[in-house]
Image (tube, helix red, strand yellow):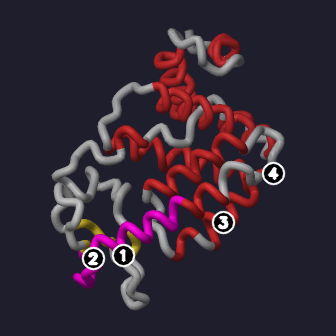
Amino acid sequence: MEAAFLGRGLYRSLHDPQEFGTYLGALKCVRESCPEGRLLPVNPLKISSVWRCDRCSLKMDNIKASKIQEIASRMIMNNAIKREASHIIDYLNDHIVKFLLPTNQFTVELKLQAIKKIQSDRPLVELREKEKYCLEILDILQRLNYGECFVKGVLCYELFVTRVTIAQLLNESEIATETSNLDQLRTAWQILKPSGNRPRDLQQLVVTYGIE
C-alpha cells in the first residue's frame, strides 16, 4: 500500500478549501490562543491566495503557508520511510499534533506508513493505533466519495486482520466475528477479489469466516 495514494485526489474539489470536511490541505492555526483553528486559503483557485483561520480570522500570506507545508513534507519523509512503527506513532502523538491537523495530508501519509509497518506481532498498544488510523482514513475516503477503490479494500483488510489479532490477544474471539468486523472483510474481498495484488491470505480468510 503506497503512502502517497491520496496524492492524486487531495484537491479534487478546488473550490472547496475544506475538502468535503476532511481538511486535508488545511494547516493548524499558529496562534497559541487558538488551538482548534484551521488555516485555509481564502481563494483556493488562486496560488497566491491569503490563508485565514476559520476560528480567530488570523491571516497568513501564501509564502508562509507554503513554507510550513514544505517543512512538514520534509519532516514526514525524514520520520517515516526508514523509521519503525513505534517511532512513527510517538512522532504523531508527541510532535505532529502540535503543528498539523489530524487529517492533514502529511499526517495521513504518516498514518499510512504506520499501518503498513505495524504487523500482527506488535504490542497491543500499536495495534490499537493501527485500528484507529484505518478507521480515520476510511472515513476520509468516504467523505471524498472515493467509492470502492483499491485502497479502501486494503484498509478494510488491514482493519479486519488487526481486530482479529487484538481479539486473540485479549482472548475475546467473539470480536473477530462481530457483524461490523465481518463486513470489513466482506468489503475487502468484494473490492480486491479481481486484483492480482490482493493480500495473499485474503481468500483463505474469506473461506475461514464463511464470507462466500
**How far apart in space, not on screen, are marks 4 and 3 (Cα)?**
17 Å
Q: Which mark is residue 61?
A: 2
- Residue positioned 68% across, 58% down in the render: 88
Question: Residue 92, percent across and down?
Answer: 61, 64
| Residue position marked by numbered label 1 in the rendering | 64
Q: Earlier in the sequence, mark 4 or mark 2?
A: 2
Q: Earlier in the sequence, mark 4 or mark 3?
A: 3
**How far apart in space, not on screen, are marks 4 and 1 (Cα)?**
40 Å
Q: Callout 3: helix, strand or loop?
A: helix
Q: Evaluate if marks 1 and 2 touch, with contact meaning CB atoms under 8 Å apart.
A: yes
Query: Magenta part of the protein: which range?
Result: 52-73
| Residue position marked by numbered label 4 in the rendering | 123
Q: Earlier in the sequence, mark 1 or mark 3?
A: 1
Q: Label 3 neighbourhood size at 10 Å, few (<14), some (14-19), many (20+)?
A: some
Residue 203, picture quadrant: top right
Q: Magenta stretch containing residue 72, yes or no?
A: yes
Q: Callout 1: helix, strand or loop?
A: helix
